[in-house]
Image: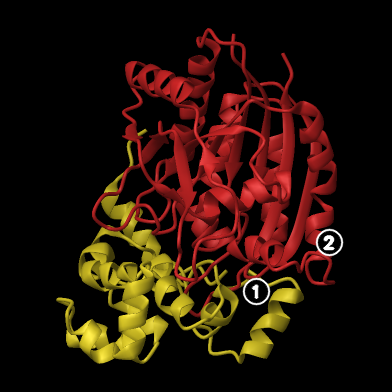
Amino acid sequence: MSIDIHEYLAEFDDIPGTRVYTAARARQGYWMNQFAMSLMKAENRVRWLAGERAYIDEWPMSEAQKQAILDRDYNRCLDLGGNIYFLAKVFSTDGLSFLQAVGTMTGMSPEDYQAMMIAGGRSPQGVRSIKEKR
Amino acid sequence: MARITAGVATSHVPAIGAAMDLGKTAEPYWQPLFAGYDWSRQWIAHEKPDVVILVYNDHASAFDMKIIPTFAIGCGERYRPADEGWGPRPVPDVIGEPDLAWHIAQSLILDEFDMTIINEMDVDHGLTVPLSLMFGQPDAWPCRVIPVAVNVVTYPPPSGNRCWRLGEAIARAVDSFPEDLNVQIWGTGGMSHQLQGPRAGLINAEWDNRFLDLMSQSDDGEALRAIEHIEYLRETGSEGIEMVMWLIMRGALGDKVRPLHRHYHVPASNTAVGHLVLEPAR
């Protein structure tokens, strides 16, 4: 089975409101994700919470990446190469659940997002493809 | 001879583990989800598998961005629950089955599946939540576990077809192990969910249920194996891609299966929960 890698990757940009974690994003976000990974260790979480700016300055990240993390702007983090499972270490350290943190990326209030999930989640209708409008 | 006697599919949402660890399973939000596992817990108490080959994905716990194995098999003696940022889950250590695991690893490599071999790692919710769902909260897990970790985080993950064929190869490897062992294979993750971006919260119950239908029918998996990554992404959300791991389990059971149990529930946190128990029908 032969797949054209260019066509394969190009299709990912056609999904509304979604950043697929491609190799290009993985390269761009390498240190942001590794920074987040460091929060797996309890002693690092203590240092991070005691002084976020000093801790993040130890990592070779761009200023934009650092600011996005400090702002907890997870959509911006995704744009700059972050991956949600790595970013999860940051919001877990903040005491946020996946439900609470993920909701912040949708523009909805936490209550509205939770209510949408209990009602069966977001319908795929209209958010499958940008160009095909389906 | 070792033999694969059953396949289990289940989602592995971290909030499910938290709900169990914090004693919330009887709350109205969680009760219907856990009720769908009552049958399975009775069934598995009767089946008493010696070993579970547990197909799952690591969520930036044992593997960071330094090393990204597409298919990895745990050949270690013991695995500790990972600290995923809120402390390790209060669940027992997972006991490995190195003899069978090494046998499978060697067999797979000779069968042209170039596995990464892991001797030491921590295991995260992807592996421990399915154990909790199936066994509850025992002091020790009642079976040994061979972790099979699949990369479904960094693109591209393996194709559904490749996963199915890996399952077939795992079954061949188990069949050639001389010790008499009752082995189950579990495929975990899914179902529809998206944990990122403005489209987060996507659930596609219609697609998920069609997938459960296809998993439960007796055939060579042609329709399942043909599902491309882009379809999982569009129809089931960016994290729905985890369902390719179910195909490893299904491929290992052979063409003919008998569906024993099925459960579907929305939501657990951001996710649609699906669960199947299947038996090979030879």
- Up/down of B21 relative to B214, above or below: below
Q: Which colour is chain B painted?
A: red
| Residue at the disc numbered 1 | A122
Report the chain holding disc 2: B
| Residue at the disc numbered 2 | B32
Q: Nearer the viewer, residue B146 or A81?
A: B146
Residue type, mark 1 in image? Arg
Residue at 40% across, 22% down = B102
Q: Nearer the viewer, residue A55 or B164?
A: A55
Question: How many residues crowd around disc 1 within 10 Å: few (fewer than 14), some, or many (20 or more)?
Answer: many
- Up/down of B251 relative to B228, above or below: above
| Chain whose colour in the figure is yellow | A
Residue B266: image quadrant is bottom right
Q: Is residue B217 visible?
A: no
| In this rendering, position of residue B2 left or right of residue B123 | right
Q: Residue A12's spot in the image, x, y percent?
A: 39, 62
- Quadrant that contains the C terminus of chain B: top right
Residue type, mark 2 in image? Pro
Report the chain holding disc 1: A
Query: Residue at the front extreme?
Result: B139
Q: Residue B186's spot in the image, x, y percent?
A: 61, 37
Residue at 40% across, 87% down = A72
Colour convention: by chain
What secondary structure is marked by label 1? loop
Q: CA distance from mark 1 to mark 2?
A: 20 Å
Q: Is residue A79 visible?
A: yes
Residue B109: image quadrant is top left
